[in-house]
Image (cartoon, grey):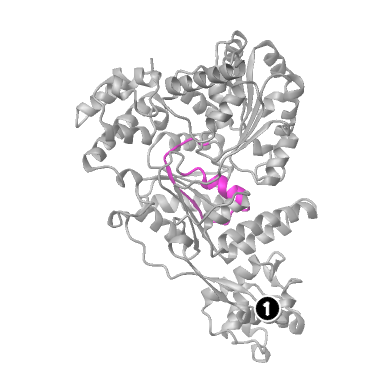
Amino acid sequence: MDDVETSDATASAATHVLRKIFGYDTFREGQQEIIEHVVDGGDALVLMPTGGGKSLCYQIPALVRDGVGVVISPLIALMQDQVDALTALGVRAGFLNSTQGIDERQAVEACFVAGEIDLLYLAPERLRVDSTLRLLERGKISLFAIDEAHCVAQWGHDFRPDYLALSALHERWPTIPRVALTATATPATHAEIAARLNLENARHFVASFDRPNIQYRIAPKNEPKRQLLDLLRNEHPGDAGIVYCLSRASVDKMAEFLTQNGIPALPYHAGLDARTRAANQARFLREDGLVMVATIAFGMGIDKPDVRFVAHLDLPKSVEGYYQETGRAGRDGLPSTAWLAYGLQDVVQQRRLIDTSEGDDTHRRRLGTHLDAMLALCETIDCRRVRLLDYFGQKSSPCGNCDTCKNPPESWDGTIPAQKLLSTVLRLHRERRQKFGAGQIVDILLGRKTDKVLQHDHASLTVFGIGTELREAEWRGVIRQLLAQGLLAVEGDYGTLVLTDASAEVLRGNHQVLLRREPERKPSRSSKSDPKSTAARPQASDLSESALAIFENLRTWRGATAKEQGLPAYIIFHDATLREIATRVPNSLAELGQINGIGENKLAKYGQAVLDVLNNPDPEPNPEQSVLL
C-alpha cells in the first residue's frame, strides 16, 4: 500500500509541475513512466526521437526531487538559450562553461551551493576539473542528466572523448539517479552507451523513432541548386529551414546563391570566426523565416520548433547522422520535409573519403557499413520510413507519406546492362591496363568519340557503343546502384572504377541484378495551388481564414516581443500554442490558461498582451505589457 501511495504521490507531483510550469495537461507517450521512475530515484537510459520531449524527462524530476538537477551537455553555444527558455517558464536555471567570466561563474556557483537554482548545465569537460567536482560535492544534487548520450559511443556518429569520463559520476555519487538521453541509437550504439556509462542495470526506455510529421524524400541530383530553389519557393516560401552541405566552400556558395535569389540565408561552418558563427546561430534562432546553410557542425541541440524543412545537398555518411539531422525539422509536430539530393558523385566521393581516412581497417570497415546502410536507404524501392526505422531495430508498415509511397519506383532486371558495364571496366583494365572514371566509362558505352576516348584507340574496343539502349542519366544510375550493392568499387584519388570480388558472379550470369528505376517526376507546383501538399506551410492547411489572420497577428506580436527581450520567438510561445489560441480565441486569462503551452509564469507575463492582440485586429506591441517580470 505504501508503494501505491508513493507512486500516486509521484505521479501527482509530476503532473502538477507539467501543468503549472509547462502548461500541458497530459504527458506525451512514454514520458510519464520515465519521469516517475527517475523521481523515485531510478537510473534510466532514454532513447526518444528529436521532438519527442526528452528534456521534460529530466527537467520535471529535477523540479520534483529535492536538490539541483545537474545536466551534462556538449552544447556550449546553446546553453544560454536553454537557460533562457527555462527562465521564461519561471524555472531557476544556470550554466557553467568556458564562455563565462569569473564573476558570472562565481555567482552561478554560489547559487548552486545555496540551492537557489533548480537546474545547472555543465559542459562535459568541466567534470575533468577538480574544482568542479569539489563544487558539486558542496551542493545537494537531485539527479544527473547526460544529454546527447550518443556522444559516448565510438560506433555512433558524433563521438566526444570527454563523455568517456562520465562513468565516474556513478562511482563518486552512487546514490544520485542518472538519466542518459539520446535521439539516435542503433542496437549497437545503444549497447555501447549502456556499457560506457555503466547503465546496464538501469531501466531502458526505447520510444518509437518514427516522426510521422516528417515527409522523407530523396531525389536524383539534377542541378541541385535549382532543385533546392524550387523546393523552397514552391513548398516552403517564408519558412525556416536548414540546408546541409559537405564542404565549407559549398556552404558559402549556396548561402550566397539563395540570398541572390531572394531567400534570406546565412552560412555556418567551422571556417567562420566564432563571433560570426554565434551571430548567425542567434539570428536563426531568433528570427522567423531564415534558412541556415551549414556543415554538420551545426544543429545538435537546436531547439527551434518551427524548422519546416531540412535539406541535404550531399550524401550523409550514416543513417544515424541523417536521422539526427532530419530530426531537427518539425519539432512542434507540424508537417515538415526532409529532402535529400543524391547522385553518383556522392557515392564516389564518400567511398574515396573512407579509403583515405585515418584509422585502421576496422575503422574503415565501420565507415563502410554506415555508408552501405545510407545507400540502401537511398536506393530502396520500399517505404523510406520502413527502411529507416528498421535500421534502428523497429518494425513498421508503409507510411503513405514518403516519396516512394506517394510515387512508387519500379524495379527492373538490370543484369545485362550491369554485365556490359562491368565488362567495359574489365576489358579496359585487362587489355589496356587502364582505369577510367564513371564519365569516360559511360562515354565508351554510348559510343561517344570524346577527346579522352579517342586517346585510347576506341575502334578496337569491342565494348565501344554497346550501351546505346540507355541514356547517360540511366547509365549513371546503374553505376551508382552497382556501387551501392558492392558490385563495383572506387579506387584512388581520381575515382576510377574497379571490379570487386562479387563482380565475377554477375559477369558469369550467376547473379541477377535488380535496379531501381526512378519514376517520372511531374513538374512541381506551388503550394498555393496544391492545398493538399503536406509540405505546404502547415498553419494554412487546417486554419480557417479568420483563424489564420489571428495567427499571423499573434506571430507579429510574438516577433516584436522576442526582439525587444532578446529572446528566440519560440521561447515566448511555440507556433502550436499560437495556432490553438487562434482557433479557440479565449476571452479571459482563465480561458487562456487552458491553452497547451501556457503555464502560470507565461500567463502572468504575456496573458494580457495576448488578449489585447485578440481584441485588436491590428495590434501594436505594448512594451510595458511584454517586459520580463
* Whether residue 464 is situated above or below residue 122 in the rendered picture: below
Residue at mark 1: 422
- Start-end of magenta stretch: 302-329
Residue 96 visible in the shown view? no
* Whether residue 302 is situated above or below residue 7 in the rendered picture: below
Callout 1: SS: helix
Looking at numbered disc 1 in the image, what kind of residue is underneath it? Answer: Leu
Left or right: residue 19 compared with residue 171:
left
Mark 1 closeness class: few <14, some 14–19, many ≥20 residues within 10 Å = many
Please report the residue visible at 58 percent of the width from the left and 66 percent of the height from the top.
344
Say if the magenta span includes residue 320: yes
Q: Nearer the viewer, residue 226 or 452?
A: 226
Q: Nearer the viewer, residue 402 or 227?
A: 402
Say if the magenta span includes residue 336: no
Look at the image and tell me in which quarter the N terminus lies. top right
Left or right: residue 238 compared with residue 136:
left
